[in-house]
Image (spheres, helix red, strand yellow):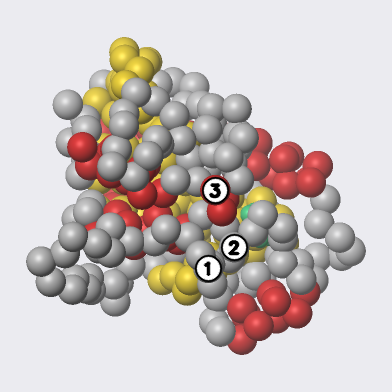
Amino acid sequence: MADLAIIGGTGLTTLKNLEITRREVMRTPYGEPSGPLLHGKLCHQDVIFIPRHGRGHTIPPHMVNYRANIWALREAGVRDVIAVAAVGGIREDMLPGRLAIPDQIIDYTWSRRHTYFESELSEVTHIDFTEPYSEKIRNLLITAARDLNQQVIEGGVYAATQGPRLETAAEIDRLERDGCSIVGMTGMPEAALAREMGLEYAHCAVIANRAAGRGTGPISMGDIEENLTSGMERVRSLLETAIPHL
Ligand code: HPA
C-alpha cells in the first residue's frame, strides 16, 4: 500500500519512470476523481499518481473535483502528498523554468466545493491552517534539491486564482501588494481539503511564465509549454531524489 501520492499538474500528466502495477477506479461520496488512481513503483517505493486535470488534460482548474481526488487518495491509504503545479511568477526571482516550494497561500478562488465539513455534522468543524503546507514534505523537497545541486526557491506565497483565464496586469499588481510571489489556479481548495483529511501536503511549483504585466507583452502559450517541458524534467529528478527519503 502506498503512503505517498503525487498529484500531477499541467505538463505532468504522466510520470515516465513510474512502473504502473494497477489502475484503480474509485467512487467517492463526492463523485468521481479526475481519473483512476495509478498505483506503481517509483525508485522502488510504492507511489500513487493522479493527474489533476485528467489523463488527456481535459478538466479545467475550476472544474476539478478536488474533494473526490483527495478523498480517493485518503481512502487508498495515502498519508503524504506532493502536489505539482504550474504557476506564473510574480516576484522578480520567480523566473520561468525555476521550481519553488511555497510556504503560504492566499485563496482568491470562488464557488468551488471547498470543504468536507458542510452537512451531517455533529458539530461545526474548523481546521487550523496557519501553516498551510506540511513542513515534512517541504523539507523533503528542499533537501532533495540541495542533494541534486538544483536550485529551488525555498518559500513564497502562492496566490490561488479562479481561472481558467490568466490574470490582468492590475490583478497581478494587487496580488503583489498582497505579498504573493507566484500565481496558479489549482492550489486551493486542494491544500485545505488535504488538511481536512489530515494529509501531509506540499506544493512543488513549476514557474511556467512571468505573470501578467511582468514580462514583455502578452503571455505566450508556446513559451508556457516550453518552460513546463524543461521544468517538469527537473520535477521528475527532484521527485526521484526525494522519494527514497520518505
Ligand atoms: N496565472 C495563473 N495560473 C498559471 C499561470 C499564471 O500566470 N501560469 C501557469 N498557471
Q: Residues within 10 Å of mark 2 (few under 14, many from 20)?
A: many
Residue 57 falls in which quadrant of the image?
Answer: top right
Residue at 39% x, 25% y: name it. 36
175 displayed left or right of 79: right
Going by the picture, which residue comes out furthest to the bottom?
177
Position of residue 71 measured from the top left corner of the image (x, y, whole percent) = 28, 44
Q: Nearer the viewer, residue 119 or 154?
A: 119
Out of 230 and 4, give the one closest to the viewer: 4
First reached walking from the N terminus: tag 1 or tag 2:
1
Q: Tell me the amino acid under the disc marked 3.
A: Met
Residue count near mark 3 (Cα–Cα under 10 Å), binned few <14, some 14–19, many ≥20: some
Disc number at residue 110? 1
| Residue at mark 3 to residue at mark 2: CA–CA distance | 10 Å
Amino acid at dot 2: Gln
Q: Which mark is residue 63?
A: 3
The CB of the residue at mark 3 lies under 8 Å from ligand 1: no
Where residue 84 sits: x, y (%)? 47, 46
Whether tag 1 and tag 2 are in contact, CB under 8 A, the answer is yes
Mark 1 vs mark 3, CA separation in Å = 12 Å
The tag earlier along the polypeptide, 3 or 2, is: 3
Can I make out residue 194 in this image? yes
Give the structural element (helix, strand or loop) at label 2. Answer: loop
